[in-house]
Image: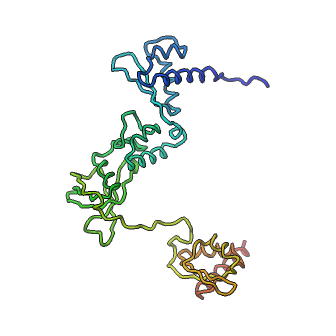
Amino acid sequence: MANVPGRDQRGPMERLVRIAAMLQAHPQGGVSAARLDRVAGFPESPGHDQLKREIRHLERQGWRIENIAPAGSPAVYRMTTVDNRLRVRLTLGQQAALRRAVLLADRGDLAQRLGLGDDAGATATTVPAAVQVPAPDALRLVVDAVRDQRVLRFGYKGSPRVVHPASVRTQNGVWYLRGVEDGDLADAVVKTFVVSRMLDVTLDDARSAQPPPQVRHPELHPLSWQIDPPVEVTLRTPAGFEPDVRRLLGEPVAVTADGADVLLRYRVTHRAALHARLVELDDRVRIDAPPEAQADLIAFLAAARGGEAGQ
């Protein structure tokens, strides 16, 4: 094979390995810049520019390397051994989400072992988000309140608040608390508070807060989308085709046997999605009730045939 023009990468890669191996062999005291220059084969220079470039390469690969020498003294580099696989494979957004999970779990030690902190002194209270914004002073108390189900008391927009916390999250570097004020428990009104605007935050005892209201989040299945007014639709299918219906339409509200057939009742809030799935099922299923749903499907099929004829 003909030689491919280009720079031979073997030498630079071996140099990086030598530097990393020397740093890993001295995890406590570190290695002086002059010694690393000799290991790398660089000529000694006051600025150690070539060495700094190689150290930046290693840092981009997920290694944490710091200069531990006092200000004004010759550089001494120390590499902290971490599991850098996550840092290399995750995007910045994914790393930020993992940091938030570590914060809520109160596991700053885990952030350090995974190499997800910005520096060796990072703790759960200073785990940075994707946008580098300092964490609010009250964040630690808010996290404790969510984790331990404690009532939060604080000043907000000039009024004292008593809040039963539900969750804490960050968006674009801003931390938010979601919770229910004490006076809104009966109606389960969930409000959002900016953590940095909370004043004089205090906590009640653990388990003093009411559990957050259960919120039904929209599901991925199109039949669950709230598009149309809800209607109860009963489908009839031979027992052997019941798994096909469940696979395409999801779990029914009720199921009854009728001889060799099975009647499956669905609460439909997205008629177009139902029609599309029924067309895919073809003669394996039919609408048994109500008549309005039968007429709706017939109109849908007629419109589809008219559209095809006009093409």
Q: Which residue is drawn at 53% across and 71% down?
A: 224
Where does residue 161 sit, x and y in percent of width and height? 23, 60
Taking the view exactly as shown, the residue that stands out farthest to the top is 44
Q: Nearer the viewer, residue 78 or 148?
A: 148
Left or right: 54 with respect to 189? right
Quadrant position of the N terminus in the picture? top right
Give the mark count.
0
Q: Please tell me whether residue 147 is drawn above or below residue 14 in the rendered image.
A: below
Query: Could you say which quadrant of the image residue 150 lies in?
Result: bottom left
Query: Could you say which quadrant of the image residue 9 lies in?
Result: top right
Q: What colour scheme has been applied to the protein in the rendered image? A: rainbow
Q: Please tell me whether residue 84 is drawn above or below residue 260 in the rendered image.
A: above
Query: Could you say which quadrant of the image residue 179 lies in?
Result: bottom left
Where does residue 168 sit, x and y in percent of width and height? 36, 54
The answer to whether residue 86 is visible is: yes
Quadrant position of the C terminus in the picture? bottom right
Q: Which of 249 and 273 is in front in this view?
A: 249
Where does residue 310 sit, x and y in percent of width and height? 72, 74
The answer to whether residue 305 is visible is: no
Where does residue 252 sit, x and y in percent of width and height? 57, 76
